[in-house]
Each structure stands twice: as C-alpha cells, then as structure tokens.
Amino acid sequence: MTDEAADLRRAVQRLARRLRDERPRGPITDVQRGLLAQIMDHGPQNAAALARRAHTTPQALTRPLSALVEAGVLERTPNPHDGRKYVLIISASGWTLLREDAAPRDAWLAAGLADLTDAERDLLGIAARLLDDLARRPGGE
C-alpha cells in the first residue's frame, strides 16, 4: 500500500503544480488565494478560525485579510451568534475574481478531458470524488 500511496501523492503533486502553472498572475497572492479557498470550503468565519485552519496566528493574517477587505474581495459582517464580533464572507466581486482565477485552469483541464474516452472521464469523475473524500479526512495535524 505504501507504493500506491506514494504514486498517488506524486501524481496529485504533479497535477497541483500543473494547475498552479495555469493560474493567471493577478491581484491576489497565494496566501490570499488560500484564505479565500478556506472560506469557500468552510463558509463565513472569523480570523481566528482561518488561522487555525492555516496553522498560524490571527496576527499573521492581519495584512492579507485587510488587503482582501480593502480590495472589496472580502466583507466583514456581524457574527450572527455574537454581534460584537465579525465574520469574513466573500463579496460578489470576490466571487467574480475567483471565477476569473479558476477559468484558465478549468479550460486546461477541459481540454485534457476532451482527449479522453467516456470511460476514462467517468473513471476520473469517480477518482475526483474519492480524492475529495480523502482530502476531507481528519489527519495527523
């Protein structure tokens, strides 16, 4: 099983690198993109929750989060459970930015998928769901 795990890890890493190469150079940094991904995956949250997921401190996220708020990509809204605090949500312009950011990668993947057979595309669909399940498993943090 170790060889299978190593082969899978290497394939996923190669694909991740290739997708990064297709990413447009734009107005947000990799750190900011990662923070936006956390909010996309886990919903509105405060800086402390983002910091826990990023394995850092809320203070370390002050600048990247402030820049996203100032750019209008994120909005601070009152926490529905504690009005004295706030949560960060992705704004309408933030969602537009994320779609534009993903478009070249989606186009590259779509072009590659077009070269595959129906059976291969079906197999990759199954693999995508399995990989997503693996990524959501709790693990050695």
Image (cartoon, helix red, strand yellow):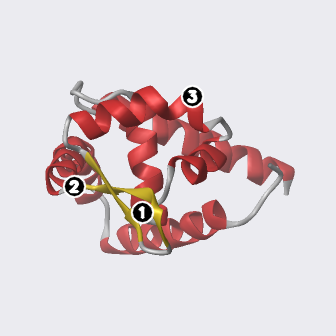
Q: Report how many numbered discs are placed on residues in the image.
A: 3
Mark 1 and mark 2 lie on one chain; the one further toward the N terminus is 1
**Classed neighbour count for the residue bearing mark 1: other residues with Cα under 10 Å, few (<14), some (14–19), many (≥20):** many
Q: Is residue 16 left or right of residue 53?
A: left
Q: Position of residue 97 (x, y in %)?
A: 18, 45
Q: Amino acid at mark 2?
A: Ser
User: Is 84 positioned to the left or the right of 107 in the image?
Assistant: right
Residue 75 placement, left or right of 135:
left
Please report whichever mark, 3 or 2, sits nearer to the chain's N-terminal start.
3
Q: Is residue 119 above or below residue 54?
A: below
User: How far apart in space, not on screen, are marks 1 and 2 (Cα)?
Assistant: 11 Å
Q: Which residue is mark 2?
A: 91
User: Which residue does the image show at 85% across and 50% down from the upper left?
Assistant: 2
Along the line of sight, the residue nearer the viewer: 55 or 65: 65
Quadrant containing the N terminus is bottom right
Among the two numbered marks 1 and 3 on one chain, the one whose residue lies closer to the N terminus:
1
| Residue drawn 42% across the image and 26% down it | 63
Give the amino acid type for the residue marked by disc 3 in the picture: Ala
Numbered mark located on residue 60 in the image: 3
Q: Residue 60, percent across and down?
A: 57, 28
Query: In the picture shown, does residue 125 fall above or below 34?
Result: below
| Closer to the camera in the image, 45 or 81 | 81
Q: Quick one: SS at disc 3?
A: helix
